């Protein structure tokens, strides 16, 4: 046996003796680490929504969410939004810069406040005012989550700026979609999924009526403050919002 092999041999022997003498200490350290990772560390992110009691919506709150029907949203969007609807995605994609500049559009991307999944029947764009409103809503929603000691959840956008062709295609699967006109043509209206949310840092959705109710209460407050109009659509399971 060479001197190097002999030195390595004795180092291994010493290590094994150390492990034997301190076996229970080593096991305890690993156990504490495992428990901390699984149960303690998540507490620093806040509580999970299923561990927090959230009040159901009152009758007055439910009435506020039905106060302004789709026809009213359309009227507001037409008067303040894009002057002429975009015909098709192909038309928009030929020269997106022209439409973005002409109509003061901003592109939506995933943020710490909201998630923008694949949109099958709309373009991820809104006018400046509606874009800014989304960030205001997100901030207020996160502030409320923080007050309750909850983790940061993001709401999910389900529909934004539609072309006239998008609306025709959507009519086949959405009974609420009007055949010839939509407030979604005008860049001030968007839909949020009612119960689909995302925990910050995770890709898997969280489905929660409790989170929905917290978000709806913030939207009702913003509606009362003259910032938006909100319609809770039961058939499509979305929250329909038009920015004032």
Image: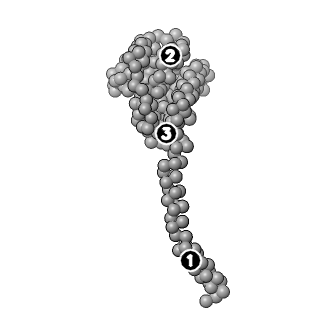
User: In the rendered image of this protein, does residue 15 appear above or below residue 96?
Assistant: below
Residue 184 x, y percent position in the rendering: 47, 20
Residue in the foreground of this view, choosing between 90 and 28: 28
Q: Secondary structure at mark 1?
A: helix
Mark 2: which secondary structure?
helix
- Observer-side mark, 1 or 2, equals 1
Q: Which residue is mark 1?
A: 17
Q: CA distance from mark 3 to mark 2?
A: 29 Å
Name the residue beneath numbered marker 2.
Answer: 223
Can residue 210 be seen by looking at this rendering?
yes
Mark number displayed over residue 124: none
Tally of numbered tags: 3
Residue found at the far right of this picture: 3
In terms of depth relative to the viewer, which is nearer, 104 or 36? 36
Circles 1 and 2, Cβ within 8 Å, touching? The answer is no
Q: Residue at x 57, y 74 (%)?
A: 18
Which comes before the other along the chain, label 1 or label 3? 1
- At a point 40% along the width and 19% down the height, the residue shown is 58
Name which quarter of the figure residue 196 lies in.
Answer: top left
Q: Which residue is mark 3?
A: 47
In front: mark 3 or mark 2?
3
Q: Quadrant of residue 101?
A: top right
Secondary structure at badge 3 equals: loop
How dense is the environment of label 2, judged by Cα within 10 Å: few (below 14), some, or many (20 and up)?
some
Q: Position of residue 145 (x, y in %)?
A: 52, 32
Vertical position of residue 219 compared to residue 15: above or below: above
Residue 221's x, y, as percent?
A: 51, 18
Tags 1 and 3 touching, CB below 8 Å? no
Which image quarter: residue 120? top left
């Amino acid at each position: 046996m060479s001197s190097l092999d002999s030195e390595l041999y004795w180092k291994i022997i010493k290590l094994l003796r150390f492990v034997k003498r301190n076996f229970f200490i080593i096991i305890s350290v690993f156990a504490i680490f495992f428990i901390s990772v699984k149960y303690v560390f998540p507490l620093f992110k806040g509580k999970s929504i299923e561990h927090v009691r959230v009040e159901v919506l009152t009758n007055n709150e439910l009435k506020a969410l039905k106060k302004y029907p789709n026809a009213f949203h359309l009227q507001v969007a037409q008067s303040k939004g894009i002057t002429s609807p975009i015909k098709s995605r192909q038309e928009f994609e030929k020269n997106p810069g022209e439409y973005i500049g002409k109509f003061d559009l901003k592109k939506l991307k995933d943020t710490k406040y909201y998630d923008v999944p694949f949109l099958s029947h709309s373009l991820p764009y809104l006018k400046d005012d509606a874009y800014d409103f989304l960030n205001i809503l997100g901030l207020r929603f996160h502030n409320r989550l923080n007050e309750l000691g909850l983790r940061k959840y993001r709401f999910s956008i389900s529909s934004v700026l539609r072309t006239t062709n998008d609306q025709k295609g959507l009519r086949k699967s959405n009974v609420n979609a009007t055949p010839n006109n939509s407030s979604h043509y005008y860049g001030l209206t968007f839909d949020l999924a009612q119960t689909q949310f995302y925990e910050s840092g995770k890709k898997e959705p969280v489905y929660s009526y409790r989170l929905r109710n917290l978000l709806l209460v913030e939207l009702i407050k913003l509606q009362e403050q003259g910032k938006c109009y909100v319609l809770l659509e039961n058939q499509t399971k979305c929250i329909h919002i038009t920015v004032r």
